[in-house]
Amino acid sequence: MHHEEALIKAFFEKTKRERYLEMVANPKKRVKFLRELYHFQSLDPRRCFAFPKGVHTAEKSRPS
């Protein structure tokens, strides 16, 4: 499995996965997919979290 496929399957909403997997596989549509990534509108909200203010890495955001 390519890294892109694993990323899509792990972090994108189920309703968008198939469409994005097709886009990544097609060189002409891949560019459009990459442009859509900048907006992060299809990420699964269960997989997202905000870093506390002043924290810039995942390691620092974990409680001790």
Image (cartoon, helix red, strand yellow):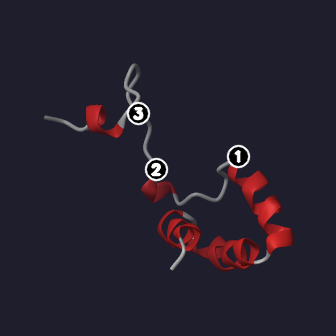
Q: Residue 16: which disc?
A: none
Sequence-wise, the earlier of marks 3 and 1 is 1
Return the residue at label 2: 48
Return the residue at label 3: 51
Q: In this rendering, would 57 be left or right of 60?
A: right
Q: Position of residue 56 (x, y in %)?
A: 41, 28
Mark 2 belongs to which amino acid? Cys
Q: Are marks 2 and 1 in contact (CB under 8 Å)?
A: no
Q: Nearer the viewer, residue 35 or 13?
A: 35
Please tell me whether mark 1 sits on a helix, a strand or a loop.
loop
What is the quadrant of residue 4 in the picture?
A: bottom right
What is the quadrant of residue 43 in the picture?
A: bottom right
Q: Position of residue 28 (x, y in %)?
A: 86, 70
Please tell me whether mark 3 sits on a helix, a strand or a loop.
loop
**Looking at the image, is 55 positioned above or below residue 1?**
above
For label 2, the crowd category at 10 Å Cα-Cα, with few meaning under 14, some 14 to 19 and many 20 or more, is few
Mark 3 belongs to which amino acid? Phe
Q: Nearer the viewer, residue 34 or 11?
A: 34
**Extreme residue in the top direction:** 54
Q: In this rendering, would 37 be left or right of 64?
A: right
Closest to the camera, between mark 2 and mark 1, is 1
Return the residue at label 1: 38
Q: Position of residue 54 (x, y in %)?
A: 39, 19
For the residues marked 2 and 1, what is the alpha-carbon distance in whole angstroms? Answer: 15 Å
Please report the residue visible at 44 percent of the width from the left and 37 percent of the height from the top: 50
**Looking at the image, is 3 positioned above or below residue 52?**
below
Mark 1 belongs to which amino acid? Tyr
Closest to the camera, between mark 3 and mark 1, is 1
For the residues marked 3 and 1, what is the alpha-carbon distance in whole angstroms? Answer: 18 Å
Sequence-wise, the earlier of marks 2 and 1 is 1
